Image: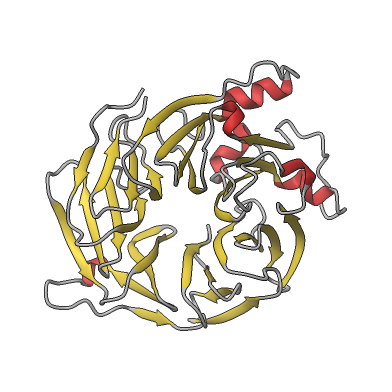
Amino acid sequence: MAKAEPRKLRGHKSAATCCISSHDRPGLVVTSSEDGCICWFDLRCKDVKFTIDVGTEPVSSLCFKTGNENILYASCENEIKSFDVHMLSDTSWKPLESYNYNKDEINQVVCNGRSSFLASADDSGDVKIIDIARKCLYKTLRAGHTSICSTVQFIPWRPWEVITGGLDSKLVLWDFSKGRSQKIIDFGSDAQSNSGQCLNPAFVHSIAIPEIDMVDKLGKICAVARGDGVVDMINIESELSRKGTSKESSSSNVVKRVSFDYSVGGHTAAVSCVAFSLFQEKGRFLISGGNDKTIKVWDCLKCLDSENNNNNSNRDFLHLNINLSKKVNWLCTNQSDSENLVVCDTTRVVKVYSIS
């Protein structure tokens, strides 16, 4: 169930673009906007905690430094800026570091589990891997995408690999230590994935990877938000083993691939964002938001049990549907029992829902 009326977080002057939640301090939420500002909210309080004025251009993506959430990375146009919240004041917003390696607008920036690298995906189709300790460019991942690279994630159980998605309908697995791709999944031509809305291309808008403590439960999977309204769960190791790059058996205890589409209550327009739940039984739910002004909460464990028991007749994996009034830009979850789903839509007001 979801609380009918969401809590509303006010602080931005333009549409909210991104949101992230703290692992170390449950209830702390950071949001960004087209107004060039970053807002910090403590859900235990009523008002915005403080704001960072990055500039006049939209802030497209945010991430914490893994293991040190006092350090925040924000992408603005083709630049990544880092901030230490302990050094901020009302009169000074000077960043700690600034990285200008991307040639085009950055769509997502993420930090790996060892807090040693950043990855940034941009409109040119390139992905830049930045060495945080040495403060320099480590690798450029190129020629995997023929269009905009919209999303990137590190793979926590494969410390030298990332996975990217783009508006060429491709999902690409990379060995970034070598700077080359290992596997390309083309949703535009893949027969297994042609279950979406036929009029919309299967662009990859967002991907989510389970945190390392979710893997035993969910398997080594990747969730994919697609432009044709489909949400896919793909077994990464199974896909790699088809090429012979993985020693892991393809008969893993998780689905090789499952698609949540309109036939099982899924989205009827492009899916903009996906995230695994951090609340309650961590990783149980996959949450997706779309241009159809809905949020879907999918029961991953029910899906896994059904596949393991070969029970394909029970396809009721949709745990909850939330109807909104605007399209979803981004969403994230936090570890709280209530107020645990944060949603950025095309308005300046961030909404917080309680999922149970």
Residue plotted at (16% across, 53% down): 48
The residue located at (39%, 46%) in the rendering is 332
Identified at 54% across, 33% down, the residue is 266
- Percent of width and height locating residue 269: 51, 44
Q: Is residue 88 left or right of residue 104?
A: left
Q: Is residue 115 above or below residue 245?
A: below
Can the viewer see residue 280 in this picture? no
Q: Position of residue 35 (x, y in %)?
A: 25, 68
Front residue (pair 128, 258)? 258
Residue 92 relative to residue 224: left or right: left
- Residue placed most toward the observer, 131 or 355: 355
The residue at 40%/76% (across/down) is: 77
Do we see residue 331 in this rendering? yes
Tell whether 228 sits left or right of 338.
right
Residue 80 lies in quadrant:
bottom left
Question: Is 246 left or right of 172, judged from the image as shown?
Answer: right
